[in-house]
């Protein structure tokens, strides 16, 4: 089967929330999500899954509508900072020289790395098992994508991971019934090129 791991679109900034920060999308993020849906509309995708966090749910909605597939929430693919009271896009942390850019551990409410990895990999493997010979898309988060691809590569990583997934980037994995996993594509963002929309730290969307 083919597995598509998709990072959410650009969310709002939230700091000092009274509970877990769970921002929705910005205007730019909503446009990113629409372009993602247009880009994938011609593909045969049998199921769409999403993290329960608003930024993922709102990203998955246009894709589900295009495909006429109701997204299914999977609690276990929530991000490692799901309990944090702050959410600041990482490119903003970098631009402001915020120490949290270099040390995400300064955020409160993070899942322990081994707990996070176990729940993420277990949940995604259940999605794989449910769609033999098919295609499933999982709209989730940068840390989730890092942990799963690291497991495919045999790497041990801690959040945020070993590479940066751009907003609405697509990461494709071929999953065989034998248990073999092969990475087909990483950081696919053709739908954002030349749109003027921000893509993230590595802003191919603004390339000319």
Image: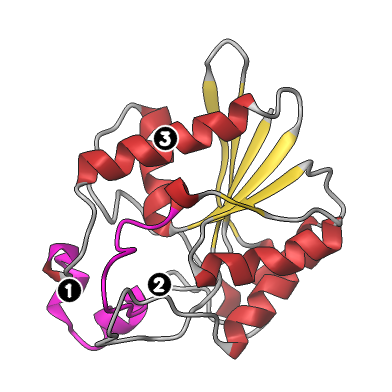
Q: Residue at x 48, y 66 (%)?
A: 53
Residue 202 location in percent, x, y? 44, 69
Badge 2: few (under 14), some or many (20 or more) residues near its Cα, within 10 Å?
some
Give SS at disc 2: loop
Q: Could you say where residue 127 lies in the image, as x and y percent from the top left?
A: 59, 34
If you read the primary sequence from the N terminus, does the residue marked by circle 2 or circle 3 appear first? 3
Q: Which residues are magenta?
A: 78-105
Work out whether mark 2 precedes mark 1 in sequence or the reverse, and give the earlier one: 1
Whole-angstrom CA distance, mark 2 to mark 3, is: 25 Å
For label 3, the crowd category at 10 Å Cα-Cα, with few meaning under 14, some 14 to 19 and many 20 or more, is many
Residue 89, how many percent across, how many down?
Answer: 37, 78
Q: State whether residue 74 appears in this view.
A: yes
Return the mark for residue 100: 1
| Magenta region, main secondary structure | loop
Q: Give the quadrant of the C terminus.
A: bottom right
Say which residue label 2 marks: 201
Q: Secondary structure at mark 3?
A: helix
**Residue toward you, 121 or 16:** 16
How far apart are the two marked residues, 2 and 1, measured between alpha carbons? 15 Å
Q: Which residue is mark 3?
A: 121
């Amino acid at each position: 089967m083919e597995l598509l791991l998709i990072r959410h679109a650009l969310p709002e900034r939230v700091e000092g929330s009274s509970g877990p920060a769970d921002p929705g999308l910005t205007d730019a993020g909503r446009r990113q999500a629409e372009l993602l849906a247009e880009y994938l509309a011609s593909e045969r995708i049998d199921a769409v899954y999403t993290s329960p966090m608003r930024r993922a749910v709102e990203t998955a909605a246009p894709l589900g509508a295009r495909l006429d597939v109701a997204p299914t929430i999977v609690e276990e693919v929530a991000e490692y900072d799901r309990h944090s009271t702050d959410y600041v896009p990482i490119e903003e942390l970098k631009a402001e020289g915020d120490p949290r850019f270099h040390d995400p551990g300064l955020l409160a409410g993070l899942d322990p790395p081994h707990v996070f990895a176990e729940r993420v990999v277990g949940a995604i493997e259940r999605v794989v098992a449910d769609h033999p010979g098919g295609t499933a898309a999982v709209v989730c988060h940068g840390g989730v994508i890092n942990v799963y691809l690291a497991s495919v590569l045999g790497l041990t990583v801690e959040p945020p991971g070993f590479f940066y997934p751009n907003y609405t980037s697509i990461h494709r994995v071929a999953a065989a019934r034998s248990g073999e996993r092969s990475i087909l594509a990483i950081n696919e963002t053709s739908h954002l090129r030349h749109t003027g929309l921000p893509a993230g730290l590595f802003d191919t969307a603004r390339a000319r």
